[in-house]
Image (cartoon, rainbow, N blue to C red):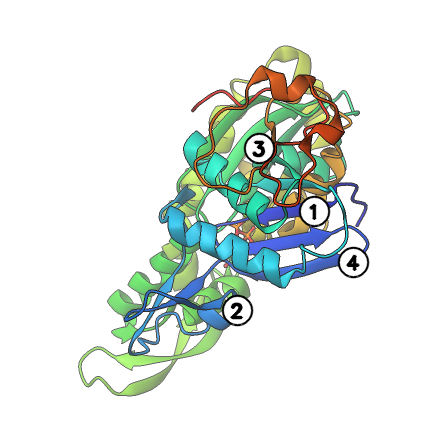
Amino acid sequence: MRLRAGVAIDLGTVNTLVYVAGRGLVIDEPSAIAVDRATGKVTAVGQAADILAGKEPQGVEVIHPLRDGVVADLDASVAMLQGFLRRAGLRRGLLRPLAVICVPGGATWVEQRSLAVAAGAVKPRCNVKIIEEPVAATAGSGLGPADGSGAFIVDIGGGTTEVAVVTSGHLVRAQSLRLGGNAMDEAIVHAVKADLALLIGRNAARNLKMNLGLTDAGTGWVETVGVDVASRNPRVEHVPGRLVAGALEHVVAMIVSSVREMLSDIPPNLAEDVVRGKIRLAGGGALLPGLSSRIEVATGIPVLVVDDPLRCVLRGAGASAACACPGTPACLPARPAAGWSPPSPRWHRRRPSAGRGRSGRTGPACRWPCSPPTPA
Ligand code: ADP
Ligand code: MG
């Protein structure tokens, strides 16, 4: 993994990844927190929280704060991010790091700012920069901002699918579908219930998806365990590939149609780059068996599943955002106190030393003539 930013964070709807310079990947865990219902205190973050999901533990609420590509619960998102960053040991070392955060496309401007402030509260005086997921995914797939060619990227995450054309680190076209791997899991849960009268959980559905996908439509099956709808007793069942492929059809058709729609709208100057550079699939959904060939057949353009698609966005977040890009619109100074307001132009005229101060309260330390992002 070639990264340059001090800290890179991929805040995904299903998984959150944190990279710290010099230490590598320090967090790769589900985006989840567990909260004590009585006290409201966070009792677990990440894997320890997600393991309780769907098991109905008494007195504990498990929250997945980023659902369907939007920040469904901002307070929980902030608490989760801070929990991860503390665990990543962000307080130690790296005097004034650049922290690059990738958030789902559906996050609003205010939510993005709140998350930036949350990161700044854990590590005062770091510079926080928020970049668009497709731009990071493109960089992670090997086409950084310095590469002038255009790229067609499809990032299939848990809650969203981002379809975009990117060139030189800029979005040319982008579309965000509010569906991804989670919608596939839900479709499988419903199909197994309807066809086999069996209630299965999220993890069982995910397992069927990963093992059968779209390829075993004719043959193949996978054993699963659920609860019989009528008797309410646990039951073992062989789920056929045909049933899973049928359940996934709706979501896959939506992704394919979004890709085709985007292809019909690319600027002619980028057409050759896209065809020669292939359609790049990133995110966990890129690993769905049979998806790449399905898109290839539907579009007539070769499809490439990027290396290690689950970490593609994180790679790009670090590599593309060493802020060798003065004036990048989404670069803003982090402040530890809540209630962020747009930075005054004066901040940007200050020298880096102007931000000194133990608590970081004396001001930000953005070294570049950046401006806050345009509100969504
Ligand atoms: P996000 O960025 O939204 O957190 P990720 O890129 O981490 O999402 O991808 C998570 C999604 O990818 C989940 O829905 C997961 O079930 C799915 N996924 C992971 N591995 C596979 C696989 N081998 N086949 C199909 N789907 C997969
Ligand atoms: Mg993602």
Amino acid at dot 4: Arg
Image x and y of residue 358, in percent: 66, 45
Q: Earlier in the sequence, mark 2 or mark 4?
A: 4
Amino acid at dot 2: Gln
Number of the label disc, if any, that sits on residue 47: 2
Q: Nearer the viewer, residue 86 or 234?
A: 86
Q: Nearer the viewer, residue 250 or 333?
A: 333
Secondary element at tag 2: helix
- How far is mark 2 from mark 1, CA to CA? 21 Å
Q: Which residue is mark 1?
A: 7
Q: Nearer the viewer, mark 2 or mark 4?
A: 4
- The image quadrant that residue 289 belongs to is bottom right
Q: Are marks 2 and 4 in contact (CB under 8 Å)?
A: no
Image x and y of residue 352, in percent: 74, 28
Secondary element at tag 4: loop
Ligand 1 is within 8 Å of the C-beta of the residue at disc 2: no
- How far is mark 3 from mark 1, CA to CA? 16 Å
Q: Nearer the viewer, mark 3 or mark 1?
A: 1
Q: Earlier in the sequence, mark 3 or mark 4?
A: 4
Q: Which residue is mark 3?
A: 132
Height in image: 162 above or below 151?
below
- How far is mark 1 from mark 4, CA to CA? 10 Å
Q: Residue at x 50, y 72 (%)?
A: 48
Q: Which residue is mark 4?
A: 23
Q: Residue at x 53, y 54 (%)?
A: 82
Image x and y of residue 226, in percent: 34, 79
Is 269 left or right of 171, judged from the image as shown? right
Q: Earlier in the sequence, mark 2 or mark 1?
A: 1
